[in-house]
Amino acid sequence: MEKGEGLLPLVSTLPREGSPGHSAGGKPGQYQIRALGTKRVRRLPQEACPGHGLWPVPATPTLVLRQTEPSPNQEGESEHWDFNATISKTRFGVKDGADWASLERQRKSPRLGVRTQGAGPDVLPTFLNVGAEISITLEPAQPTEGDNITLVVHGLSGELLAYNWYAGPTLSVSYLVASYIVSTGDETPGPAHTGREAVRPDGSLDIQGVLPRHSGTYILQTYNRQFQTEVGYGHMQVYEILAQPTVLANSTALVERRDTLRLMCGSPSTTAEVRWFFNGGALPVALRLGLSPDGRVLARHGIRREEAGAYQCEVWNPVSVSRSEPINLTVYFGPERVAILQDSTTRTGCTIKVDFNTSLTLWCVSRSCPEPEYVWAFNGQALKNGQDHVNISSMTAAQEGTYTCIAKNTKTLLSGSASVVVKLSAAAVAMMIVPVPTKPMEGQDVTLTVQGYPKDLLVYAWYRGPASEPNRLLSQLPSGTWIAGPAHTGREVGFPNCSLLVQKLNLTDTGRYTLKTVTLQGKTETLEVELQVARECVGKGKACPFLDKGSQKEPLLPPSGWGT
């Protein structure tokens, strides 16, 4: 379109009786509506129409009563209704390549009211019939995409000449779907026509295969022979068949009270309603408080462990519903309430009394997700077991002390611990000596391990044979150091728990050994043990407890005088 041009309205009027181009069917002093179609006209400068801001030949749709177009250097003339319901007469033309116009205001119309819908340069003036009661209903009432629907018009009155249908909130050219002339049945598509619309003779509008984009406000405008126009409004909502939505999460594994959960319900539909489900049921109240206004985003600050589970969203409208696949959320927490159990009984912070030479198993438990890693410590020293329990197969004084379990969560980076004290029961303090190994061979080391030694020990002494000074191997003083005795061979070592180590055994080490202890209260106790040293047979790799003498086998005995 060239600069200075506009579109004539699709509906205009015939001139009055006696004016050029008058139609014989018209009555004196009245105007008749006829279809002009779309026609390009030249715009004149706005100052040509002072007082009301309209172009002499308006670019906006209006009722043009009469118009003649000038040839070069000649006049043209236009009569039209303006927004004040005034019939205006304008003379215009082109002289020496320049536009000119002069405006004469003429009479007012006493029987027409004017209402303007919307605003802007393309808004139609509406000449209302005050008694109009047009209503529009939808068939079917809840259309689904792809349906054929009809906007049915009710309440039309009088002899109507034309219909205008608009798909939008105002009587704007950009929303014009179609104009329909009743007498001829001619239909002229407008800018908003999608190729699916058709106007019926009774004014109703058919739309074939509606789509969600057809939803919105529809306006019917009618014209009668008295230049009165009636307007009816209707609304159509086209419901789509909803595709399955998906739940999108910022993360499916969060740390309790530290992380924020953010779920979004993804759906191609922007008009469907959204609702959420937790483990197949309704959302807890705390989670509902985190919904966005449109319900599509669920946020939860400082997530809680009880909010771990399966989340789903559902989109729905009056004709369709679809639910997403569940998305599972894990919430990490703990460890907390770390405890040590003995036979399913909590013993944390307690002292456990255990009989001598009996077994004991301690279990470490906690509330944690995921299951924590466990580390055990005995008297402050780590034990290399890496399990949730520690086992004492044979309780002795050496196993007495503090046992500590430490639980570590690799996801929350938190840890917790619990401790118990394990002691021998009072009835278990009966000493005994156990050789380790029990059947040592020549050349090996052996430890005479003392179990149940007195805890208030002052001194002790070891003897090879009876407890006499010539047979004394070593003694331990109250300071904790030991000194060698007359029978010490340089291969014997004493320990604070009264045990004796004999290194590199030979056959002469076979015999009786005696331990003598003295407590702080002056109590003396003597304990004996027999040690047998086996001889390894040459080439057989086994213990050979007998010495071959010809064809007769005799047991290997210690030298004469040993132990007397």
Image: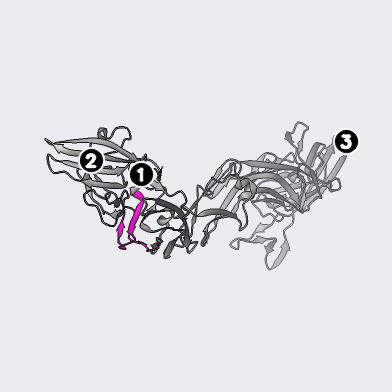
Could you tell me residue 14's position as x and y percent? 27, 51
Residue for point 32% across, 62% down: 183
Mark 2 and mark 1 lie on one chain; the one further toward the N terminus is 2
Q: Amino acid at mark 2?
A: Arg
Residue at the spot of label 3: 522
Mark 3 and mark 2 lie on one chain; the one further toward the N terminus is 2
Q: Secondary structure at mark 3?
A: loop
Residue for point 61% across, 58% down: 280
Q: Amino acid at mark 3?
A: Gly
Magenta stretch holds residue 176:
yes
Q: Which mark is residue 43?
A: 2
Name the front one of labels 3 and 1.
Answer: 1
> 485 above or below 447?
above
Could you tell me residue 189's position as x and y percent? 31, 57
Residue 416 seen anywhere in this rendered image of the structure? yes
Q: The magenta stretch spans which residues?
A: 174-203
Q: Callout 3: few (<14), some (14-19), or many (20+) C-alpha neighbours within 10 Å?
A: few
Residue at the spot of label 1: 123
Q: Callout 2: few (<14), some (14-19), or many (20+) C-alpha neighbours within 10 Å?
A: some
Residue 410 seen anywhere in this rendered image of the structure? no
Distance from label 2 to label 1 (Cα)? 17 Å
Could you tell me residue 251's position as x and y percent? 51, 48
Relative to 464, 194 lies left or right: left
